[in-house]
Amino acid sequence: MHSRSKKESIVSGISHIETVDGISEYLLKKNGLKILLAQDNSVPVAGFMVTYHVGSRNEATGYTGATHLLEHLLFKGSEKFNSEHKNSISELLETKGARINATTWFDRTNYYEVLPAQFLPEAIALEADRMRTARITEKDKITEMPIVRNEFELGENHPAEALDKQVWATAFQAHPYHHSTIGWKTDIEQVPISRLQQFYEDFYWPNNATVTVVGDFEKKEVLTLIKKYFGVHTASPKPFPSLYTEEPAQEGERRTVVRRSGVNMIAIAHKIPNAHHADIPSLALLAVILSEDKTSRLYKALVDTVKATSADTYCWQLHDPALFETVITLAPGVSHDFVEKLVKKEYENIAQKGVSAEELQRAKKSVRAYAASRRDGPYAFLSSINEDLATGDWKRFVTFPKSLEKVTTKSIQQVAKKYFVEKQSTIGWFIDTSS
């Protein structure tokens, strides 16, 4: 069901935009806060998430990782909710059985609570307060920085993460997808608190955020609470800093090598469009055909033949053009060059001969199950719709699974021909130096 009727506006000052597949969108007119409601009163549990439309794509040299470091600092308390008042986020909600966390990615940052429905008002009040009055102090940065740096070092000690970081940094030279969400080590260690405070001041406003509520609640009651607590804030007094940098066209294959102790791996990446491009459904299903399970192309070609211990393919669906990436962990004694050629050969086979109808139907069955799982409980719902919000349109949560059903074997072959070309590829090797 798709409705644009505004008759559902049940709280003054909040307008109903549309309802799609049981998800209703509203606008808090005073400050531009967007609201998504998905009511399900079958279980007395609710989920609340604030998605800020800012991520590592909004960072630059000198303050890479700022979004993630800020995420940590926003748990240090706000004007009304803090340890001195005995109502910090852990004292207020974790003691009542709430699941609380936050995550940062290229295009967004989110803060969420999944909790007994009766405590939803407390979550709304807390999130509204830290939207504009979070404590971002030098003292707290000093205590949190080593924790974030430890996260960075854990990633560096993980061969797949270390390789992936270098592949993205090589594939993207101008666009900020060049740097990972965690940031570069010296930026994490040395970014001044004033820069983090400025970043918060630039982006943490109601008109740069979407509130999503799922589960057990009544619409009028929850909209009234959102208006009460978030309505105290004004919209941003100035435009948000815009990202106008576009990645220039790539003019040849790029390569990167990581030599350190670990495990031998290769990564093969190709430039693809953003999440809303018409080719993405075909590319997404192609990724499933290549590496979803033991029936997949790369599993049969590499794992079954003991050339590799794992094969994973990702169709990254982001706000801006991203990557289609295959990552292979080599079996002992197998050369990087040999496996790289095998993967490229499989790509070429698909570009020249296509895939079978059986392969495509198996892939569609798999993604149908995945699409259903995205609504399986408040957290699954929140985390899934959040990723579609990050691409610029929450309705993709509803429309993308339907677009996958329209993919044909012909369109799979067409995207393989179109994107598996050398000039827009980046190859990464992780070479284990321990043996």
Image (tube, helix red, strand yellow):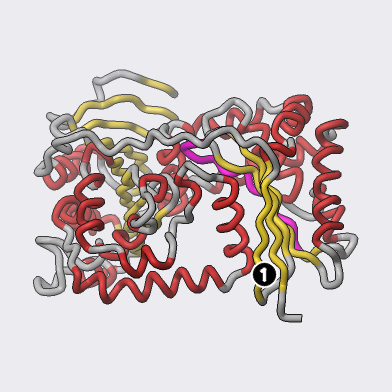
Q: Quadrant of the rendered structure where residue 94 is?
A: bottom left
Residue 283: image location, x then y, percent? 67, 36
Q: Position of residue 99 (x, y in %)?
A: 35, 64
State the extent of the magenta-drawn residues as a range: 310-320
Residue 114 seen from this side: yes
Among all residues in the image, which is located at the extreme right? Answer: 305
For this view, does 418 lie left or right of residue 359? left
Q: Confirm whether the magenta stretch covers residue 311.
A: yes
Residue matched to label 1? 259
Above or below — where is 422 with respect to 88? above
Q: Amino acid at mark 1?
A: Arg
Tell me the residue at 42%/41% (across/down). 390
Residue that sits furthest to the top in the current view: 5
Q: Is residue 421 left or right of residue 275?
A: right
Of residue 48 and residue 235, the one placed in the foreground of this image is: 235
What residue is at 38 percent from the left and 47 percent from the top? 108
